[in-house]
Each structure stands twice: as C-alpha cells, then as structure tokens.
Amino acid sequence: MEHMLNFLGNTGFGMVDYRHLIMIAIGIVFIYLGIAKHYEPLLLVPIGFGILMGNVPVFKGLGLGIYEPGSVLSYLYFGVRQGIYPPLIFLGIGAMTDFSYMLAQPRLMLLGAAAQLGIFITFLAALAIGFLPTEAASIGIIGGADGPTAIFLSAKLAPHLVGPIAIAAYSYMALVPVIQPPIMYLLTTRKERLIRMQDPRPVSRREKIIFPIIGFLLCCFLAPAALPLLGMLFFGNLLKECLVADRLALTARTALIDIVTILLGITVGASTQADVFLTAKSVGIFLLGAASFMVATAGGILFAKLINVFTKNKINPILGAAGVSAVPDSARVVQLIGNREDPSNYLLMHAMAPNIAGVIGSAIAAGVLWSFMM
Amino acid sequence: MYGLEAISAANGWTIAISGVSIVFIGLLVLAAVMANMERILASWDRRGELLKAFKQKPQEKQAQVREAPQGHPESQTPDKISLRLSQEQIEVADHFRLITKRLGKPFPLPQLLEKATEHGISNPHRHLDTFLKLNLIVEDKDDRRGFYKWASDVQVTNSKVGKP
Amino acid sequence: MVSTRELKEMEFFKDFHESELSDLASIASHTRWKEGETIFHAGTPAGTLYLLRVGTILLCFPNGRSMPLRDGGHAIGWSSLVSPFRYTATAVCLSEVRLYEFSGRELYRLIQMNAAFGQKLMQKIAQIMEQRNHYRQGTPVNIRQE
C-alpha cells in the first residue's frame, strides 16, 4: 500500500498544480491555432507540443526535465542555449531567398533599417519599466519580427526569458495581418497609398553572387557580433546563387531548416515553464512586444514619407511596413492594403525588398545589442 | 529604478542611438554599394575588353516581318445556321428556354443552372457546356458581357429526324 | 507527379524557364472534378491556384455575370496570391475537368526564392485580372423579363 501511494505521489497526477494546467491549456491553444487556424503552423505546433512536454510534472533528479543536466531535452536544448539553431535557420533562409528584390531597388533597404527603430525604442521602454539591460535588449529584439534572431539574442543575454520572448515573437509574427493595417491607414493618406512604384530592374547573376560576399563583409565588419547570424544568412544565399552547390542549398532550405525548426520549436516550448511564463514579467514582455511591432511598422512608414520629401521618385509609404521582417507576411499585408486602394497596383515585389532588408537589419541590431551587453 | 533614470543608468540612450546609427549606416552603405554595383561591373567588363584585341560583331536584329494572317475567304454566312442536336438535347434546350423566359434577357448562367437542377433536368452542366460550344447560347455584348442570350441566327434540327 | 514537360505545354507557362517549370512541377499535383462539382465558392479563403488542363469550368461572379473557361491552361484561383485572398468567383465544372493544383503557400515560397519568377507570375496574374475585371466589377444589369 505504501509503495502504491509512493508511486501515485510520483506520477504527474500527484505532483500537478494549477500552474501546470494553465501552461498545458496554453500549449493546447497553440496547437489549435496552428492546426485549425493555420497560424504559423510550422512553429506553433512544435512550440505548443513543447509546452505540453515541458509542463508535465516530473520528479526532479530523474534527469527528465529540460533544465536537468543530462536529460534528452537538455541535450536538444543545447542548440538554443548556445545559439546554434538560429544561425542554422538563417542558413536555410538565405538559401531560399532571392535578394534581387532588394538589389533592384537598393533605396528600399533603408525602409528595412528604419523599421528596426522598434527594437531600440522598445529597449528603452523596457529599461524604463524596470527590466535589466540584458532583459530589455532581449525584449526589444522582438520588434525585429525575426524568431531566430529573438531566440538567439535572448539565449545569449537572458536565457530565462527565451520561452516567453520566443512565444511573444512568433505570436506577433502570426498577428502581423492584424497589427499592421490600422497603423498603415493611420499614418498614410489615400493619395500616398495609391503611389505606383517603377518596375524593378533585372538583376544579373553576377550581382546576386557578389552581394552575399560584400554584404557579409560590410555588415560583419561593422557589427562583428552579428557574425553567426549574418554569416549563415549570406552563406546560404551564396550557396543558392552560385549554382554550383545546388545540393547544399537544397538541403539547407529543406531538410536542414525543417530539422532545426522541429528541435528549436519543441525545446523552446518545453523551456516555457510556469514559473517563468506565468509572471508579471511575461505580461510586460507581451505588451512591449506588441508595442515593438507597432513602432517598427510606424518607423518604416514614416521613414518612407521622409524619403519622399527629398526625392522626386516617390515611394509608396506603406512599403515601410514591410521593413518588419516577418517574411513574407508583412509584404503580403502591404500587397493587400495597396490592392484595396487600387486593385491594379501590385506592391508585393517591391515590398519584398524592405522585408528582406529587415532580416539583415534585425540581425545587425541583435549583434549591436549583444556587443553592448558583453 | 524606473523611468528616465533607469535608462540613463544603463546607458540606454547611448546604446539606442548607436544601435540605430549602426543599423542605418550598415544598410545605407550596403545599399549604396549595390546601387552602383551594376555600373562597377559594367566598367570592369569594359576594362577587360580594352586590354584585349576585340572585335565586336554587330548583332543584326532581323526585323521580324509579320505576315498578315492568311485571310480566310469570306464565306457567305447564311441567315440561319443549322444546328443538329439529339432529341435529348432539344428537350433540354426547350426546358432551358422556359427557364430563361422567367429569368429575363439577358440571363445569368448560374441561375439557369440552379433552376435546371431544381427542375430535375439531368446533366444540366454538360448540356450547358454543349450549348455554349455550339453557340446556341451566346454571351451578350458591351456592358452586358457576362450575361447570355439565345443565338438568334441558329436553327435547331433533330439529328435523327432532320426536322426542327 | 506532374512533369516539367506537361507544364511546358501550357500556354500560361510559355515564358517560364526550364528551372522555373521544374520548381513549379515539384509543387503541382493533378486533380480531377466531375461535371456539376464546385471547385471553390466565392468568398471562401483562397489557398490554391488552379490551371485548367481539360474540360470546361464556369466562373460565376457574385454580380450574376459568368464566363466559361475551356481547356487551354486558363488559371483560376489567383486570389491565393493577391488580395483579397478570398476567391472572387465560384468555379463550377460544366464537364469532367482536370486541373493542375498549386498551393498558394508553396507558390509564395517560390516567389521568395526567385524574384524573376515572382515577377513573371504576378504579371500573368495581372493580365488575368485585367481580362476578368469587367466580370468581377461590373454592376448587375437591368434584365428584361420576356
């Protein structure tokens, strides 16, 4: 009888408390959103299930939990803790992205830069409300709308906040079609939204090969701490564009990125435990994350309007919203808003330019913040 | 510590301004380099060409003379085109005419199909496809495009009997 | 499995390179519909672009207008790529129909990977939208009752 009671006491049923149940409910909601609503399913399903795995009550000392050395989850989480998975995802992103949208219209890259204002303004706001500098930097990077970058930086600077920051980042990325349009309407006039862009010029193969090399050298000389992310991004792109390493590029953008996404998602989810997630800090992270996206959107749009003051060849300012580097969702939102005003105005190709530049910009911002915090 | 004090204590202003500047400078320089890359590469190509003995063959663009399409000799269009349909098709066409009388002129095809299905006509979609192919039902013109009418220059005959 | 050769025969893809057709073939699938079936309804979320291979489809617009599409590589479901991202017409099969099916998500992935391809595809979509604009936007006409 005593053994039976001991056994029952060591099961999940015996050790569960209300916080586990809340987290399990959150995990189920994420899985539901991914499967039924198709909100970023490739991320929400692994993260959701990871939350379930991380919040099953287990007896500490058995080497089961993600934070227990020697456990399987701990070994898999190593890639997050040490910042290995995000650069590998960037390798895949580089291998699947055509940068010629950006190369054909280099001035639109500045909109990607302007959108990163959201990161630094949120950083200041986080400091102001009492977060530590390392935490504030990790929270600010949510505004870069780049999941791997957010996970990379928070793993380096505030590993205890990786879970809520990752969940906030991916949640808001999925909500880009909800967050951005009101800001776009607020900050632009109908006349501005009707601006048509010139057709982009064709970009030669040589330019597409030279760009990742030059881009890598320029960006990493300026912000060396961005080396892991940008190095992999540009390397992946070079593999794609050089045409002599097609097999490697194909592996990077298919099998490799999928494997890493699975491991990243499940371990980030599992690391999101009740004692970290169900706190006032998480509420602050979610609020600041939302603000970060909004400021980033506004930053890109306002900068486009500023450029228009000085140039004859006007930019449609809603392209600035695509500087928020949720690729390609924010570009699609720009297309949607532009189409609503003028069904024959196709902005998608133009919006991809700041969208991709935003990926580079957020990686540089992450490198800068990391180097300041070192 | 909260508010502006907290920001100053953590060198927040310096970090933010430096950070924004570095991101901007990075992308600005990259944009400037790539904006001029096409020109730089073109100059590089030209320099290579000047060093060698180079003969350039002018590319002759053969003007493509488009021949006017062979005009089909004008055939005398009869006043009425005769269409041979099976008995089943004739019956369906008659039923369709009844429906379109109520729908008006010109009539919308989706409603025709809906009514035809309600009335139990078999394979209304296939029959409609046939009538459209044979130009028994034709699209109206100008701002009425997308609505349809019965062709006025078609006479339907029974393929077996040969009588309308 | 759809082959590159099959796609090459389609008028819609005549300007596309071999490598682009190969990418398209990798995401394409065959689909078959019977006479009378509805492929999609107007107003529903658009997730798939279709290319007609064989058969006749009637595109029915909410304003009462309709247009038949017969064989020859006509594309339907372009709303999977452009706003409003909801089908603007109902597609009804007037005969047995065979289509190539392309997932909107996968097409976006190809667009992200290849700008020239994206440009070509969007231009084709633009042409289609232009051709069908009258049917989509036209106001209902006064119908004379006979």
Image (spheres, rainbow, N blue to C red):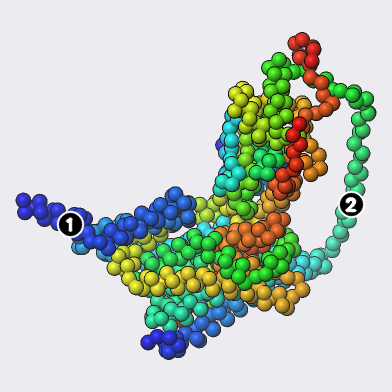
| Residue A52 rendering spot, x and y as whole percentages | 32, 56
Disc 1 marks which amino acid?
Answer: Gly
Q: Is residue A81 left or right of residue C49?
A: left
Indicate the position of residue C106 as horizontal and vertical percent values.
Answer: 56, 49
Q: Residue furthest left?
A: A1
Badge 2: residue crowd in 10 Å (few <14, some 14–19, many ≥20): few
Above or below, C30 against A78 in this view is: above
Q: Which residue is mark 2?
A: B60
Q: Quadrant of residue B32?
A: bottom right
Circle 1 residue: A14
Determine the secondary structure under disc 2: loop
Query: Is residue C31 left or right of A200 when viewed as pictured?
Result: left
Relative depth, front residue between C134 and A4 = C134
Amino acid at pointer 2: Glu
User: How busy is the neighbourhood of tag 1: few (under 14 within 10 Å), some, or many (20 plus)?
Assistant: some
Q: Residue furthest front?
A: C145
Residue shown at 50% from the left, 52% from the top: A254
Tell me the quarter of the image containing the C terminus of chain B: top right
Choose mark 2 or mark 1, whichever is in front: 1
- Inter-mark Cα distance, 2 to 1: 86 Å
Residue that appears at 47% across and 74% down: A140
Q: Are marks 2 and 1 in contact (CB under 8 Å)?
A: no
